[in-house]
Image (cartoon, grey):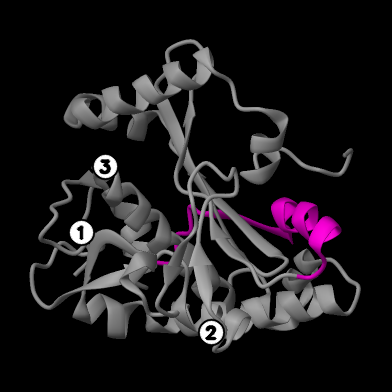
Amino acid sequence: MKVSGLFANNRADACCLCGSTQDLTGEHKVKASALKAEFGADRMVIGRSDDSSAARSAQGPKSKAFHFAARVCGVCNSTRTQPADLEFDRFNQTARQLLEDGRVPSDVFSDPRYIVGSEPYLNVFRYFAKLMCCHLADVGGPRPQPIANFAMGLTKANLIWLSVDEDWTYKRYSAVAGPQQYAAHGGLVIYAKKRTGQPSGFHSTLTFGRVRYTFYFRMLFVARRELRRKYPVFNDWCRAQGRLATATPLSQSELLMLGLVSDEAT
């Protein structure tokens, strides 16, 4: 059921898309089917690109190590978001093939299947809308209702922005070690107003092999105001993260890794 309003409370024992407490399951940060396509039956390990901790073994593409802490109900997981899951697999395969053919992966948007406003096009964005809801729930944030409704296929109003390129980290490593099997996600990045520190949007990335997806959404004034007034604890946490980032700015390498700047000039 579509819910009105800009934000809703998230609970650890409820679906981060619809709020149901029935038949809860985990959602993958890094899609199991895409992991299987990338790694096959080969052994996988999980680590950080900055080498700050030792890599640990992953049992396989369906390992709980790849799950969000946030929960999704059975109906959302198996019915409401399944078209988006399946469409992302097809979209990802096309983008990967473009790179293999010596083209840029963003040419995937030139495929007639993904004409702006078509159902396949919207379903690709719905997949990333679902991931964004999971990321926010994982850090204690409220559910962005318009994005959750879109992720569930209940509306065509898309607030997610998406770019597709060749992953900077992959290029850096493969230049030294040769072609690699690789997948990654960029966690959650908070956009903030420079003067006030008020959160103004959220950003993440997802990579399979050479292809990186950078996705984000921006909040208009009315959404920023609601977040500040109705969710002060989360709003203040976001502002604190902004102060930390101001005190210790990200390096150029970190900005490139997170897709916050382009590497065209590097």
Q: Is residue 27 left or right of residue 162?
A: left
**Quadrant position of residue 134:** bottom left
Q: Is residue 100 left or right of residue 21?
A: right
**Viewer-proximal residue among 47 and 124:** 47
Q: Which residue is mark 3?
A: 141
Give the extent of the magenta segment.
154-179
Residue type at the position of mark 3? Gly
**Viewer-proximal residue among 48 and 188:** 48
Closer to us: mark 3 or mark 2?
Answer: 2
Q: Which residue is mark 2?
A: 36
Residue displayed at 77% across by 42% down: 262
Residue type at the position of mark 1? Val
Residue 191: where, in percent of width, then height? 49, 32
Q: Judging from the image, what secondary structure is the residue with disc 2 in?
A: helix
Is 73 contained in the magenta span?
no
In the rendered view of the protein, which quadrant contains the N terminus?
Answer: bottom left
Instruction: Say the numbered circle drawn on residue 3.
Output: 1
**Quadrant position of residue 251:** top right
Task: For marks 1 and 2, give the CA distance.
Answer: 35 Å
